[in-house]
Image: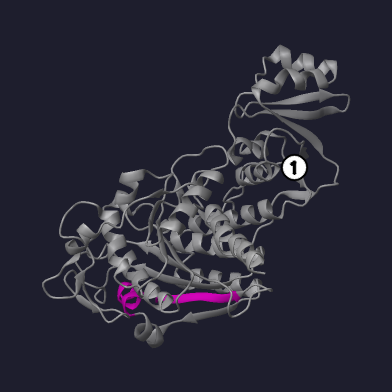
Amino acid sequence: MPDRSLPVVAGDSPARPVRAIRPEALEVCLAGLPEAQAGWLRATGFAAEPNEMLLLPGEGGIAGAVLGLGADRSPFAFGELANKLPAETAWRIEPGDFDSADATLGFLLGAYRYDRLKPAKRAPATLAVSGQHRALSEAAAVWMVRDLVNAPANLLGPAELADAAVALGTSHGATPFRVEGEALAAAYPTIATVGRGSERAPVVAGFTWRGSAATEASPLVSLCGKGVCFDSGGYDLKPSAGMLRMKKDMGGAANVLGIARILMEADLPIRLAVRLGCVENSISGRAMRPLDVVRTRRGLNVEIGNTDAEGRLVLCDLLAEASDEHPDLLLDCATLTGAARVAVGPDLPALFATDDDWAAQLLKHGLARHDPMWRLPLWDGYDPWLDSPVADLNNISSRPFAGAIVAALFMRRFLAAGTAWVHIDLYAWNDTARPGRPEGGEAQTIRSVCSAIIDKLVVMRADRNMLVT
């Protein structure tokens, strides 16, 4: 899937100004405008409310624009600009009472449309940008994630998702890999089991990467993603309504690629390992059945209590392999449970962690970057709910409660002792359009995760080294 260009031009390109204003600063702004423009704003009743935008007249037609911010401090305060400003015109956002990187990011997030199969009704406006490497990198990563999640399942199967991972790694100087066939069945038996029912064979793909200043002693960040390109539920078949959006069940893998892209483009002094389980959960004579027993990479036998609880099976072998490398952080993303959506809704990914410090960092950066998540407990009291009479454990609980917690407890069983592990159960979708967040596939937590990694593994480590020297 080829990358797409963001609607940006160089900062010194000809561009009209946009003034973004808060209500308390409106009178000061009006006083600094030409009399005709100030009069126009007063006559129209412009009050600098959120997403309120007006074009300013000038001798040549449109001289500029004003945008109301209200009290919104998030990037999404700028999320409607690209579509409200005249199509294919260039604009620059004048400095003001806001973070300039957030303004750039919000503009570009709002400019996104999935137009690979049907042209957009209109082209977005273009933004003149100087610098802003972080905002541009994050916006490009979000666009990539959204494109992957929005792609129809017949066009993005396991092989195509694996191709996307390999292409991303290759384009950033990483060492890619892909495992298929008998080698996959030997190394990742649970992924092979989930994918057995589909004519489209499962693939494990990913890459390893090292920043230009990294060494063998540099921190290792390991990322694992659930890449179920379509989930029918298997023999425990989903109802049609539940199956409708299951092309997005690879959203965890897509978000992992978004995180990896930002980290690599920042050229951090870290080592990075990325693994995706790319698979389709289908029904056939070869598909796994309820009460089958599968032996995992870790050597544990798992009874299949429900074939629709396949995401944890996709991840458990990846987590076992990754944790054996003793990473400084092992993080997985997955559209894992409907129970997480019941608990915290679509906008708050559920966070589970074996390390309190990592959890605190992620929650802090989630709030600071307006890319939040909410921590749920790895409650040991529920761990016996996974007991099986015929195997080491079942892939579902014996009770109809705490589904997201139990799924996380299942995956915890496969970690090497002492692993700093974070599991993010996310939705990867916008049910309705909002400023900066079009309906459809969505990147969630990728900005906050990258900020936390930079803070904890790069900034903090650099500070400690300075103290030692």
Looking at the image, residue 41 sits to the left or right of residue 458; the answer is right
Point 61% across, 42% down: residue: 110
Which residue position holds label 1?
88
Residue range (magenta): 189-209
- Which quarter of the rendering shows the C terminus? bottom right
Point 16% across, 75% down: residue: 391
- In the depicted structure, whether residue 106 falls above or below residue 235: above
Point 59% across, 61% down: residue: 460
Between 278 and 29, the one lying in front of the other is 29
Residue pushed farthest front? Answer: 468
Q: How many marks?
A: 1
- In the depicted structure, whether residue 50 falls above or below residue 295: above
Whether residue 208 appears in magenta in the rendering, the answer is yes
Point 80% across, 18% down: residue: 31
Residue 251 lies, in percent from the top left, at 45, 58
Residue pushed farthest top? Answer: 43
Looking at the image, residue 308 sits to the left or right of residue 38; the answer is left
Question: How is this picture coloured?
Answer: one colour
Q: Residues within 10 Å of mark 1 (few under 14, many from 20)?
A: some
Between 64 and 129, the one lying in front of the other is 129
Can residue 351 be seen from the camera position used here?
Answer: yes
Quarter residue 236 falls in:
bottom left
- Which quarter of the rendering shows the N terminus? bottom right
Residue pushed farthest left? Answer: 389
- Secondary structure found at label 1: loop
- In the depicted structure, whether residue 263 falls above or below residue 114: below
Residue pushed farthest right? Answer: 59
Looking at the image, residue 220 sits to the left or right of residue 27; the answer is left
Residue 238 lies, in percent from the top left, at 26, 56
Residue 450 lies, in percent from the top left, at 56, 58
Looking at the image, residue 215 sits to the left or right of residue 153; the answer is right
Residue type highlighted by circle 1: Glu
